[in-house]
Image: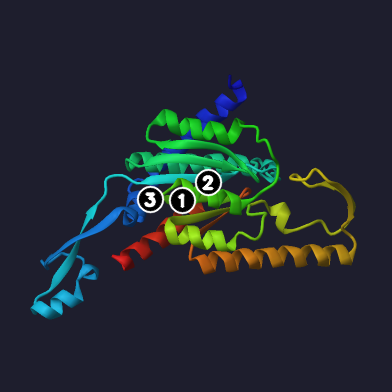
């Protein structure tokens, strides 16, 4: 039985997400991700008004007339939300935790998928596979995905992205659209991320809280690692502490940037203290440009 607080939160997320889908993302999801479900069908003679980017120059040169490539669109694709439910997701220095943001982003993208007649599923993970929800396409099913993210109590607290991707690649035999949503507080998953991006259409959604990027300049604080539970007193006035923190932070950021770049995966950077809609719109515009160039 869900608590009234969770039910209220799910309802608010549903209303907000459906409004965004109808008012902002109507048609954008389809145009951005339709390349996932396009298969070459045939070539036909060019007629005025056709997109010149689809001209087949090989056939055109052979026949001395302009021909364009024709594609048949598959009516359905599978969308998988691979969501990080490790303990670091409960952190949030603004009015939303990372998990709240993950739930809202999943809702917006899942309702967009539903409007496009796509199936959506969920693979929730920590350092183990916590929950798998088989892809379906109906409103009730999407609400279930949101419910899992908000109310499910994970068995473990740590993060293992490599393990999640291994499971995903065994699970999804055919090419799928994958949204990997995490704060990416993990390492040694670069090879699996590249393999996943080669097999699927992979979009990495990186969730960040501002308090993680800038530490206090003075004061002694007792900190607790959300994933290990370890407590430690830290003197932020210490130059050594600040230097070591930013050194480790920058090294990890460089690792992530190199990993995403090498895998050629799309990345959306989302912060808990800023409207995510701005970054989603930027992503859709960028992705639309790539699709137009491809086809």
Q: For mark 2, does the 10 Å Cα neighbourhood hold few (<14), some (14 to 19), or many (20 or more) residues?
A: many
Residue 27, x across and y down, in percent: 32, 48
Could you tell whether 164 is left or right of 109 in the image?
right
Count of marks placed on residues: 3
Q: Earlier in the sequence, mark 1 or mark 2?
A: 2
Q: Quadrant of residue 289?
A: bottom left
Which residue was labeled with disc 2? 82
Q: CA distance from mark 2 to mark 3?
A: 16 Å
**Circle 2/circle 3 CB separation < 8 Å:** no
**Circle 1/circle 2 CB separation < 8 Å:** yes
Which residue was labeled with disc 3? 174
Residue at the spot 36% in from the left edge and 55% down from the top edge: 32
- The secondary element bearing badge 2 is classed as strand
Could you tell whether 62 is left or right of 271 in the image?
left
Q: CA distance from mark 1 to mark 2?
A: 7 Å
Residue at the spot 32% in from the left edge and 66% down from the top edge: 294
Which residue was labeled with disc 1? 178
Q: Which numbered disc, 3 or 1, marks the residue closer to the eye?
A: 3
* Viewer-side residue, 224 vs 269: 224
Q: Which numbered disc, 2 or 3, marks the residue closer to the eye?
A: 3
- The secondary element bearing badge 1 is classed as strand
Q: Quadrant of residue 243?
A: bottom right
Here the colouring is rainbow
Residue 277 seen in render: no
- Indicate whether 184 appears above or below 99: below
* Viewer-side residue, 216 vs 153: 153
Could you tell whether 182 is left or right of 26 in the image?
right
Residue at the spot 72% in from the left edge and 63% down from the top edge: 249
Q: For mark 3, does the 10 Å Cα neighbourhood hold few (<14), some (14 to 19), or many (20 or more) residues?
A: few
Q: Quadrant of residue 58?
A: bottom left
Q: Earlier in the sequence, mark 2 or mark 3?
A: 2
């Amino acid at each position: 039985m869900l608590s009234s607080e969770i039910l209220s939160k799910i309802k608010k997320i549903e209303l907000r997400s459906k409004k965004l889908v109808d008012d902002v993302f109507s048609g954008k999801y389809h145009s951005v991700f339709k390349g996932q479900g396009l298969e070459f069908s045939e070539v036909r003679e060019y007629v005025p008004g056709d997109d010149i980017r689809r001209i087949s120059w090989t056939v055109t040169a052979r026949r001395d007339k302009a021909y364009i490539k024709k594609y048949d669109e598959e009516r359905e694709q599978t969308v998988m939300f691979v969501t990080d439910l490790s303990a670091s997701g409960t952190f949030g220095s603004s009015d939303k935790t990372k998990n709240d943001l993950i739930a809202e982003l999943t809702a917006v993208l899942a309702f967009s998928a539903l409007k496009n007649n796509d199936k959506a599923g969920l693979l929730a993970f920590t350092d183990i596979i916590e929950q798998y929800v088989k892809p379906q396409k109906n409103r009730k099913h999407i609400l279930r995905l949101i419910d899992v993210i908000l109310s499910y109590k994970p068995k473990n607290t740590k993060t293992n992205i490599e393990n999640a991707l291994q499971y995903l690649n065994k699970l999804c035999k055919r090419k799928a659209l994958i949204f990997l949503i995490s704060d990416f507080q993990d390492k040694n998953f670069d090879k699996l991320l590249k393999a996943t991006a080669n097999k699927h259409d992979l979009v990495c959604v990186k969730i960040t809280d501002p308090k993680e990027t800038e530490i206090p300049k003075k004061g002694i604080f007792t900190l607790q690692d959300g994933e290990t539970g370890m407590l430690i007193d830290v003197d932020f006035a210490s130059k050594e502490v600040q230097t070591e923190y930013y050194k480790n932070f920058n090294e990890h950021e460089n690792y992530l940037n190199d990993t995403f770049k090498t895998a050629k995966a799309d990345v959306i950077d989302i912060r808990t203290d800023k409207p995510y809609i701005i970054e989603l719109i930027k992503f859709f515009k960028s992705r639309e440009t790539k699709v137009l160039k491809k086809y």
